[in-house]
Image (tube, helix red, strand yellow):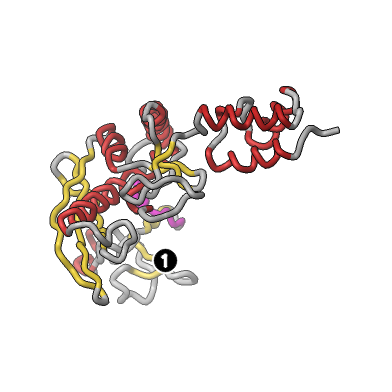
Amino acid sequence: MGCSWWRDFGAYTWCLAQTCETPCVGELDACKHKEHYIEDIKEVKMDNKELIEKPVTDIVYRPAEVIKSATEAAKKLKEIIASKPKKVMINGEQYLEYEDWQTVGRFYGVTAKATDANLIELDGVKGFKAQAVSIKDGVEISGATAYCMQDEENWKTKPLFQLASMAQTRACAKALRNVLAWVVVLAGFKATPAEEMDGVKPNGHKSYGNGVSKVYANISEKQAKRFYAICNGSKIGYAEIKDYLVGNFGVEKAGDLKPEFYDDACHWAKQGAVE
């Protein structure tokens, strides 16, 4: 007697024990090779001489329900971030800081914990290497490693304890990112934590000490007034200004311009009205 469980090798079908040279047609319990089965081999059952694959994995959660829940979380996250007076904007993209990632984590019951921070030296440069884990229901579900080194422009003169702290902050943010980035991206934000962008110079924006550019989401009221003053001096009418802003930046008022577009708008205004 043989067995009714098979592995498909392309042109041939063989007993899982790989010792039968011809197909078996008996019952599983009758197979003398039963004890040789390998658990991680995909099983295929013979039913009326047709192979029916046994699924290796099943969907744990219904996709529609997962997306619905994530969309709700993303919407609420956008509302929270919109209420912040200063946002991390780098080259027109918005990045979330560690406390923002903690907020997303709370939606799903996920927290982060730094496990250690060790003083290291790489190619003669001192700094700290930190590790962190993300935790849900008391179980570690992800982890990350991050560094903060003295060769970084914004950290070369800082005391070592501050480097250790930043390395831990980066590691915790990355640990949360590994689990929750898909929700953050769904909300329209970049998946890289802001602390990882330390040192990036975003279009000349002012740095606030930690290397991350914190700027208002839109240009200031003073900048908007200057733009309109230039337009007025160039005899550009309101209708033409509105057409220009909508056509190029998708906004109707100068006050809604993103900082990275301000110089371009002023340059256009200086050109004067279209004849």
Q: Residue at x 24, y 66 (%)?
A: 37
Q: Residue at x 38, y 47 (%)?
A: 207
Residue 39 visible in image:
yes
Answer above or below: position of 30 versus 260. Answer: below
How many numbered marks have been drawn onto this rendered protein structure?
Answer: 1
Dot 1 surroundings within 10 Å: few (below 14), some, or many (20 or more)? some
Where does residue 61 sit, x and y in percent of width and height?
34, 37
Where does residue 252 sit, x and y in percent of width and height?
64, 25
Q: Residue at x 22, y 57 (%)?
A: 158
Query: Is 61 left, or right, of 143 in this rendering?
Result: right
Query: Is 102 left, or right, of 229 in this rendering?
Result: left
Where does residue 115 sit, x and y in percent of width and height?
14, 54
Q: Nearer the viewer, residue 214 or 188?
A: 214
Q: Which residue is disc 1 drawn over?
A: 8
Query: Is 226 left, or right, of 149 in this rendering?
Result: right
Query: Is 120 left, or right, of 50 in this rendering?
Result: left
Residue type (three-letter) at the residue carrying disc 1:
Asp
Quarter containing the N terminus? bottom left
Q: Mark 1 falls on what kind of element?
A: strand
Q: Residue at x 28, y 43 (%)?
A: 98
- Residue 151: image quadrant is bottom left
Quarter containing the C terminus? top right
Where does residue 107 sit, x and y in percent of width and height?
28, 32
Q: Nearer the viewer, residue 22 or 168?
A: 168
Magenta part of the protein: which range? 50-58
Residue 28 visible in image:
no
Q: Nearer the viewer, residue 44 or 176?
A: 176
